[in-house]
Amino acid sequence: MVSNDHLIEVENLVMYFPVTAGVMQRKIADVKAVDGISFYIKRGETLGLVGESGCGKTTTGRCILALYEITGGKIFFEGKDITKVKGKDRRVLRRNMQLIFQDPYASLDPRMSAGDIVGEPLLVHNLVKGREYKEQIAELFRMVELEPYMAVRYPHEFSGGQRQRIGIARALAVRPSLVICDEPVSALDVSVQAQVTQLLMRLRDELGLTYLFIAHDLSVVRYISDRVVVMYLGKLMEITDSDELYDNPLHPYTIALLSAVPIPDPVVDRQRKRILLTGDVPSPVNPPSGCHFHPRCRMAIDICREQEPELRNIGGEHWVACHRV
């Protein structure tokens, strides 16, 4: 049942990528990037999506944007199943969902001026014409704390933080309701990360935006997110409020991730116990049986190897997929 309070609802999302071999490119296996996950994003909130590299975070975001033809499941946007939307209707839908890329150096066309980059969505969707076009670009530049005269410059003339602001302005040009932030600050210096994060929070409050904030830096996620989803090898491990996750983590994988987050107090940092995960992340082509995390889990027992844990509510809005909790 789709709720009116939820902007996005993902139900049993599956995204497999075929592995082919031979002259005839015959399919021999699947990369199970996302393997049956369900969650929702409330209107006006920031949902953090965290996990190690290769766990399926970016794939999940791109599935929501309908950049991939999903293998299975449903995605509801404002109550409408977008997996069935095709052609012109999908183009209209994408106006309401935009993406901020991870790399500010690779995501901007070096042959286009900053103004043309920011204004391109306005032209693609036929939103403005003539003099209003330049006025909109100037307004978007001011919105992300850049001077409008910078619109004539090219990407190589900007710093990394300024480039990311241009990317943010481009995403906001068509006034979307959902913005998927794919590790938007991971390629920036620490001081610039704070500035861009503050900018994203201000824009969320002023424009009434909803964010899916994909990241692996848990300290940034705690600062910006209302709720957090922890993902591992295509599966959801834990979902709860941001403060609850950091104060009371329950899944062994979440506990291990949080133990690696730097703490500015040297006394507290020396006293806490770090958990080092052994081994590497298993291949998504052939994931482990039962709980996907069990080969690296110190608490694993026989049932963890044999039976996949169900994501269950253990009180309030706290959901965990672990037999030992």
Image: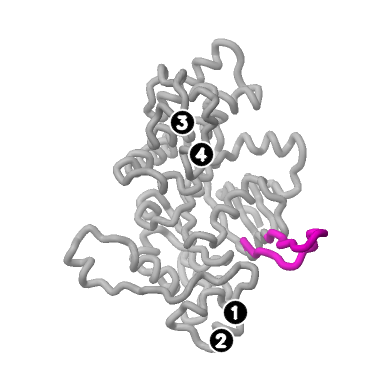
Tell me the CA gap for discs 3 and 4. 12 Å
Q: Viewed as shown, does residue 28 lie left or right of 46?
A: right
Q: Residue at x 61, y 73 (%)?
A: 287
Type of secondary structure dominating the magenta stretch: strand
The answer to whether the residue labelled 1 contacts the one labelled 2, judged by CB atoms less than 8 Å apart, is yes
Quickly name the residue at label 3: 166
Q: Which span of residues is magenta-colored?
A: 16-34
Quickly name the residue at label 2: 303
Residue 52 image position (x, y, % from top left): 47, 62
Q: Viewed as shown, does residue 68 lie left or right of 295?
A: right
> In terms of secondary structure, where does tag 3 sit?
helix
Q: Viewed as shown, does residue 100 lie left or right of 16?
A: left
> In terms of secondary structure, where does tag 1 sit?
loop
Q: Amino acid at mark 1?
A: Gly
Task: Give the color scheme: rainbow, by chain, secondary structure or one colour.
Answer: one colour
Badge 3 crowding class, 10 Å Cα cut-off, few under 14, some 14 to 19, many 20 or more, is many
Tell me the CA gap for discs 1 and 3. 44 Å
Which image quarter: residue 234?
bottom right
Which residue is at the far bottom? Answer: 302
Q: Amino acid at mark 4?
A: Ala
Quickly name the residue at label 4: 106
Which image quarter: residue 284?
bottom right
Based on the picture, tell me whether residue 127 belongs to the magenta stretch: no
Instruction: Give the label, 4 or 2, closer to the camera.
Output: 4
